[in-house]
Image: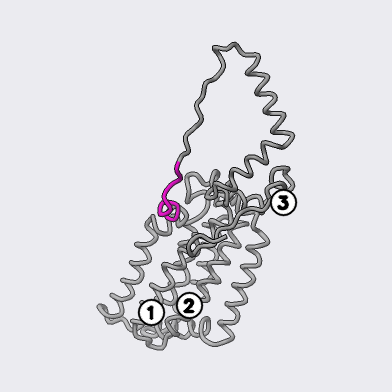
Amino acid sequence: MTRGNARVWHACDDLVARYADGSLPEPDAWSLEKHLEGCTECAVRVSRAVRGTAPAALLAGVREGVLAAAPPAARPRVPAPAPVPGPPRAARLLWAAGPAVRGAWLPAVLLVALGAMALGFGGGFHGARALLLAIAPVVPVAGVALSYGPHADPLYEVVAATPAGGLRLALTRTAVVLAVCLPLLTLTGLLLPASGAPAAAAWLLPGLALSLATLALASFTGCRTAAGATAGGWLCAVLAPVPAAPGGEATQRLAEQLSRCLDGAGAQGAWAAAAALSAALLAARRPAYDRLPRR
């Protein structure tokens, strides 16, 4: 069924019946419950099916018995509740995006981009692109750490128990983080002089792989600990040779190390493999995102 240019689907009778009798697998039940938030027709059908089950009939009988035994003056006279409109779509999208667009993270990303431009053009620092490429992969990692988990949402425990919570919400907020910082930092790198550094887009695949690795590791350690481990590992890998460089050669040494980590089919293929493995681990650890450690 279509409405305008959007395709509208409805739950089949078998799906509704299995949900009502409790035999529907949990992920499918979550998906149906999420669909019911915006589909009145299916919500009515599911409600009718649930009322027809044995537990619902038993509860209805108990309720009728209690009301029959109560004095007439004590019987409740509650009018049918008026339908409560849901929040506007823009508000739901803003909530789903999380601190990635509502907190201090977005100004921090802008500050990184503007700082690199100021160093490259205002300060005459020829290694601005190399420095940006060293920092850029940890920016989305920080955004992931600030976007999901017990420390990010006051209502985290409630949200995690809903169909919209868990890994689905974590991936939504990660996508927002990547959608903000990837084009902004890549464009900044394109505007800066190369000065021996890798291409401005060379960090995209490592940034994606580190973000997915952070999410995967978060199922064991929590978001902040996972972000510290992945970001710290990257910075150690690219900055380790810099302190040992002779005076004036630190920028060149950094560019060379970045080339080893980012340039070439071998390096990019390794990052692609790391991203794929992290995605597979994410799928395997999906239930853990409903109760992330508080670290």
Which one is earlier in the sequence, the residue at label 1 or at label 3? 3
Distance of mark 1 from mark 3, alpha carbons?
Answer: 54 Å
**Which numbered mark, 2 or 3, is in the foreground of this view?**
3
Which one is earlier in the sequence, the residue at label 2 or at label 1? 1
For the residues labelled 1 and 3, say whether their Cβ atoms are less than 8 Å apart.
no
Who's the residue at 41% across and 88% down the image?
Answer: 196
Indicate the amino acid at tag 3.
Asp
Q: Which residue is mark 1?
A: 189
For the residues labelled 2 and 1, say whether their Cβ atoms are less than 8 Å apart.
yes
Q: Is residue 188 above or below residue 229?
A: below
Which one is earlier in the sequence, the residue at label 2 or at label 3? 3
Q: Position of residue 170 (x, y in %)?
A: 54, 58
State how the image is colored: one colour
Who's the residue at 67% across and 28% down the image?
Answer: 60
Q: Is residue 32 above or below residue 203?
A: above
- In the current view of this chain or complex, which residue is farthest to the left? 122
Q: In this image, 198 relative to 18: left or right?
A: left
Distance of mark 2 from mark 1, alpha carbons?
Answer: 10 Å
Q: Characterize the magenta stretch by its predominant secondary structure.
A: helix
Q: Which residue is mark 2?
A: 203
Q: Position of residue 152 (x, y in %)?
A: 47, 51
Magenta segment boundaries in residue numbering: 85-94
Instruction: Judge by depth and name the residue closer to the eye, 175 or 217.
Output: 175
Q: Which residue is mark 3?
A: 14
Indicate the amino acid at tag 2.
Trp
Who's the residue at 49% across and 82% down the image?
Answer: 257
